[in-house]
Image: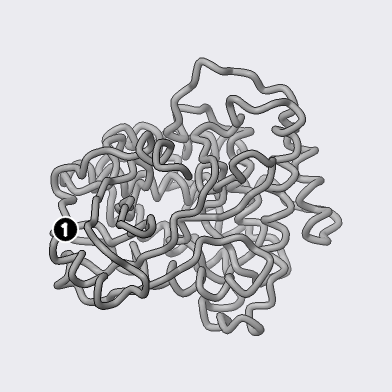
Amino acid sequence: MSSASVHSQTTAIRQGHEIDRDRLERYLADALEGFRGPLEIRQFEGGQSNPTYFLRASAAQYVLRKKPPGQLLPSAHAVEREYRVMRALAATDVPVPPALLLCDDASVIGTPFFIMGCVAGRVFRQPHLPGVSAADRAAMYADMGGVLGRLHRVNVEAIGVADYGKPGNYYARQIGRWGQQYLAAKTDEIPSMDRLMEWLPAHIPPGDETAIVHGDYRVENLIFHPTEPRIVAIVDWELSTLGHPLADLAYNCLTYYLPMEALGRVETVDDDRSGLPDEQAYVAAYLRGSGRSDIPDWNFYLAFSMFRLASILQGVYARGLQGNAASSYALQRGAAARLIADRAWDLIS
């Protein structure tokens, strides 16, 4: 990204997310090869969970990603895992930012953090990719499906991440995990979430597969080439693990089922959707890229993805009530969690 485009996506550091600039600058001067101050810091508005900052130094631009302040749910906000998987994927054909430095010493800026290179490219906040031609929009969606297929074909043993998650029983474990996370962050009754927690474990499709799953694969977490219709980096690996690849695909397809406001996106003046594939065409592109022939039980995968997203947004909402969420949109997420859970129950009932 150019300095101007990065600046338009950042804000002054928000209250509660301050960083000791001088201390960070001294640390990076010692720990990060090629770093030279002075250091300017701004905060990205995106990132519902782990606060993310743009760092401009004299010789280069970087991105810092850290754990949020305050009391955290167990196993959440694992920036160390993000760093590890991006380092491992650098040796594959999956595009990731260069992961440069991990700091687990909370005394430097208050929490563990990592530094990655700032990748030049375009970031879109809406899934219809406003401002691009119909031909480019179609090509970008085809690449989005193809890149996801490439991720799911990575040999986890070959890149040293065979222990990045537990193999097998992915859906049983994930349903349990996100059910617990929802209950830990619960503020109001959402009957459809209670029904989903009962229905989903009893309807897990037969068979099992294990791949690296991104966990939040969507347009907003992709950086596209500055001028070409292709992806140059996947970002935001906080929710990545070893799991079932169709979890990623179903989550990626939620834009075909949920309204923009439920996904936290704001409509733009440019509403052009020419070239945008329908769900069937997009899934077909993924099938070609992944080598899979078909997807039985598609509604289960969709309902699970909605359940998981509702649990995540309930956590964002709960942190917003406590005053330590990373995004100013956090307080809007409570209504979205309910809407998404209701939609999931409607889909399977």
- Pick the residue in front: 205 or 237: 237
Residue 42 screen position, x and y as percent? 27, 46
Secondary structure of the residue carrying tag 1 is helix
Which residue is at a point 57% across and 71% down the rendered structure image?
242
Residue found at the very far right of the displayed protein:
293
In-front residue for pair 193/134: 134
On the image, the x and y values in percent for residue 348 come to 62, 41
Relative side of 28 to 255, left or right? left
Query: Relative to 187, is 291 on the left or the right?
Result: right
- In the figure, residue 347 lies in which quadrant? top right
Name the amino acid, label 1.
Arg
Whether 58 is drawn above or below 161: the answer is: above
Q: Residue at x 63, y 78 (%)?
A: 156
Instruction: State the residue position of label 1.
Output: 21
Mark 1: few, some, or many residues within 10 Å (few <14, many ≥20)?
some
Residue at x-position 21% and y-position 72%: 27
Where 265 falls versus 322 (above or below)?
above
Horizontal side of 149 relative to 39 (left or right) equals: right
